[in-house]
Image (tube, coloured by chain):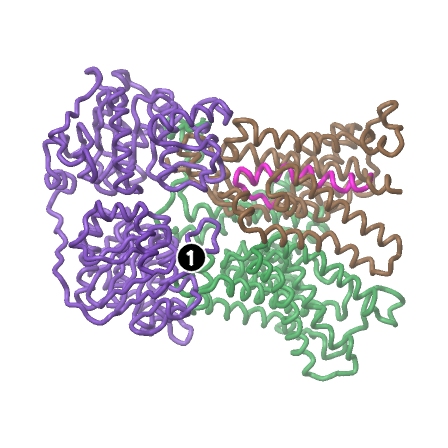
Amino acid sequence: MMRLELVKRTQKSRLMSVLSPVIAVALTVVFAGIIFAAQGHSPLTGIWYFFLEPITSLWGVEQLITKATPLVIIALGLSVCYLSNNWNIGAEGQLTIGAIAGSILPILFPDFVSPVVLPLMLLMAMAGGALFALIPAKLKTIFGTNEILTSLMLVYCSNLFLDWMVRGPWRSPQGYNFPITIDFHEWAVLNAVDVGGIYINLSAPIALLLVIVLAVVMRSTLKGFEIRVLGQSPRAGSFAGFSNRRMTAFAFALSGALAGLAGMMVVMSEIGKLQPVISPGYGFTAIIVAFLGRLNPVGILIAGLVIASSYLGGEAIQTSLQMSSKLATVIQGVLLFFVLAADTLILYKVRLVTAREGEGAHA
Amino acid sequence: MLEAIILTIITAATPLLLAAIGELVVEKSGVLNLGVEGMMVMGAVAGFAVTISTGSPLLGIVGGAIAGMLVSLIFAFVTLTLVANQVASGLALTLFGLGLSGLMGESFVGQPGIKLQSLDVPGLTSLPFVGKILFGQDILVYLSFAAVFAVSWFLNRTRAGLILRAVGDNHTSAHALGYSVIGVRYLAVIFGGAMAGLGGAYLSVAYTPLWVENMTAGRGWIALALVVFASWMPWRAAIGAYLFGAVTVLQFHAQALGLGFPSQFLAMLPYLATVIVLVAISGNRRATLFNTPASLGKSFVPDR
Amino acid sequence: MGDGTGDSTGKMLRRVGGDTPLLEVRHVTKRFGSFTANDGVSLKIMPGEIHALLGENGAGKSTLVKIIYGSLQPNSGAILWKGQPVTVGSPAEARSLGVGMVFQHFSLFEALTVAENIALALPNCRATAELAETIARVSTNYGLPLDPKAHIADLSVGERQRVEIVRCLLQNPELIIMDEPTSVLTPQEADQLFVTLRRLAEEGCAILYISHRLEEVRALCHHATIMRRAKVVAETDPANETVNTLAQLMVGNEISRVTREKGKLGPEAILLKGLTQISQEAFGVSLQNVNLSVRAGEIVAIAGIAGNGQKELFDALSGEEPLDKEDMVIFAGEAAGLMDINERRLLGAAFVPEERLGHGAVPALKLSENVVLTRHGTGEGIARRGFTRFGKAGRIVETVTSLFDVRKGVVDPEARSLSGGNLQKFVVGREVERTPRILIVAQPTWGVDAGAAAVIRQSLIDLSRKGAAILVISQDLDEIFEIADRIAVMSRGYLSKAEDADTLTPEKVGLLMAGGAEKKGAAAA
């Protein structure tokens, strides 16, 4: 009988660190091809429509950037959390509360129309997201409560809260009883600007800036060092003088702020008001983006584009091949599995052994 | 009225209990599988699909269990054989399960299902009040309690259960003594998958026999919280599932009563209750230390 | 070391049993990737023989023994049991042959009871009342009493070892393998163990005794096989050797002995005044009114078995556990009790914790990054205005490498790729290179080969003679007597008064370790 055996490498394999996401994507493409074939389509046609066709038009590129931007911003924050061993699963909720916090100005003070509203909204959204994220953080540092479960429970609460706000206190009197708020005024929205044929708004350059800032921080600053150390060896971290508690608060607050920022900008650019559903699950998809990008800022940028393209791909195969667009979510899940599996190659060499050569420890 | 409330509490608690008991065994062996939601929803869609195609709800729930087991195998392979990070892999399983179930279930949306039959014992079931509650449930309800019994007996009174607890306590020692850590964990994970699948199948075959995308609505996550609440003890899991079921049902009734609280806040109650319970449990440091399987979530690679 | 161990030639170490070897290992080789742990190793154990397997850390003893016990399979070679070739495919098979093993790092389960732990090692067994009764009877019979219902987590280290031994005995073994059994015992407990082992040998049970403690081996064992760097280099009767000849065989070329002359004492650099800290941990030890003074130029050692407050003391000194009052710890005249670790480093203190991987260094980070770990806050410019300067750290890695002869494959490897001895040299060297005024080090040579151990110990002595005050916490009495000027003993959170090393003997220290320290410590308060 054959068995898979892992032999630990003495050092992380640099080659595999770069190759593993590539292997993962390649395997996913093959998997997708098989699915297309199983549904009676030519695998190559399916792959073309899913992975490549969306980016062949200017409109496609625009959509790609639009969808990738919130994913990248949120994933950057999540990467800081995951690198420091803080498992924030509640970005979707932090996004929602952030958007609500940032919408206070245009909704409660609709006559305050001034350029300063825009940055203020962004700042308030960041503050709202950060404060909401501090709840699971504090529960973890004070009570030792598992942050995965608490941050997730709060997502459900925040969605219900938004629902109540737009149906209740913040419902627009001119809305014909639809669960929406009043429309945001001109300084409370993000207008798209024509850049070489594609229309993008302020959120894209902000995302790019954040990528650069985080890349510098993680590589070259003591803070980035602190994040990595505390995530790998908490005891070594306190030996270095770093505080695990303060890092938990910092990581959650940062990712909450970024989630709030992303949420606010989505509302400001795509919706222009508040309504019960403001995000198609960006907070959860960003988790995949973070892992696919191997928790590295530049990797996250690329991963965000890849995942965004998979959304477009889903729509493309629906239109052109009459296949379900839900295949996109399946492919995202499969991609994440392949990424995790391929990552093993970085730390271990994999060998197939026959039973005799190895050993047979049994119960 | 009270009878009706109790009946709904049972239906609310049963899927939670089934999934929680499965995950309890998994965690007792040292593995943290966050993919319960994904396994449950796969069980729900498979259960519905098999029921409709075969016409038998019983085959349907078996199909649900098998679906749960199959997806749990993916998780087991990635985390136990390839030693990937368990938290990330569990999340991957959830996302994958939600996506795949949505895809598979697309053609079933809106179709009426076939409800799992409830027991009807002549004489007993028609007893006032206790009749339906004790003798009028479907097989999965009884199975959930049988599972609590069986798991408790298994863990505390059998050698195999002792080995499983040892693996969860210290996988290095278990390996040194010659036990197959990976083998035990594979079995535990598959069991957890089957139970989660059953829990999901309950929703689509016994609870409301239809399929809706994401119909588990977070119950898998609640089940995970329940395992912590139970301090990995089977009977406490049952208590937790029923307490949670009660909170869920009562908030519906409170909404119906028009007590003046916005319905959304009442709907938040189960989730807030989970948070509060988690905080209360983690506060007791010594008990947590003692009951938490010490190798929970840690990767294991045997030296050869 | 207590009675019956001094002059071995006087005692009749006669063997019980026949002439066919009970266990024979022939030319066994085991490789892990490119690393050869056992190279053509051969060994013979006769029935009823106490057979020592000698070698320093890293010689291959543990690997050989795991092969005999079935946890590992050899790449080539044969094992014969009572003259017949066998394959020991698993520990269960070894147990059914009649081989039992008492591990160095106990294979016990904290949350389970003594009875459950023992049941797990017996075939087809559950923790029944019958088993409990057997455990109580057998354990008392052999002088190692145990309560079957106790949870392992509540037992002391010596009691845990008893569980390991009784677990073996209940399987009626013909060969018991003991891996460094006395490393966690007081001298008196070790004597009690020897009584038990001699009795077992007289009853016909052979013992494979792994150790690097030469005095013990001379006192206890009939025969010895000596390993060095994966090969067997000698076989001898320990009774016919001296400690020095055994050491020579074990280590090969002359390892420079550590030289220590009395140093010149400067002003007081470390002062612990009434240091009291109630432990918040479930199984922690509270520090009780600890008083100690260390002057510049001297090395003070704190002896004691692990689990008596050493970890808590180290954390209180390093600042990782905050204290109630600032003057409980005074470094170079400054009250440091409320300072964090980097503030203490700025006062001139340096620290080397017991656990090199996971505490002293981050395993997956490079050596240069591990330099930043403890030296970013020392005012040397390793971190400036928030930015880390890995180049500077890299140069420190080179300095430490050459000063301490750290063997590493590449210029800047990950910490975990270094061998135990080399990593320990790096971790100690990283602090010593700063020439700190104060150095606090726990278990400086735990699990380290003799060559690296000598380098480390000499560096501590040299540092103190340059004017540093050094506090060493160690379980190794040999080491303590080699380097310390004064010795104190830690027991259950109490510290005895530090006395001149010249006035102490291992016996006296052993008594304090076994409980005298609390009385002395309480009296000194």
Colour chosen for chain C:
purple
Q: Residue B12: say if magenta.
A: yes
Callout 1: 10 Å neighbours few (<14), some, many (20+)? Answer: many
Which residue occupies 85% across, 30% down? B131
In the displayed structure image, the side of residue C490 where residue A77 appears, left or right: right
Q: Which residue is mark 1?
A: A235
Which residue corresponds to the image point at 23% horizontal and 55% vertical from the top-left? C487
Question: Which color has been applied to chain A in this rendered view?
Answer: green
| Residue appearing at x 74%, y 28% in the figure | B59
The residue nearer to you, when weighing C361 against B102, is: C361
Q: Which residues are magenta?
A: B7-35
- Chain B display color: brown
A34 shown above or below B251: above
Q: Secondary structure at mark 1?
A: helix
Q: Looking at the picture, how far across and down is residue C400, in whole percent?
A: 24, 61
Place residue C238 in its image quadrant: top left
- What secondary structure do most residues of the magenta stretch adopt? helix
Asked if the magenta segment contains residue C119, the reply would be no
Residue C468 horizontal/vertical position (percent): 22, 67
Looking at the image, residue A336 lies above or below residue B131: below
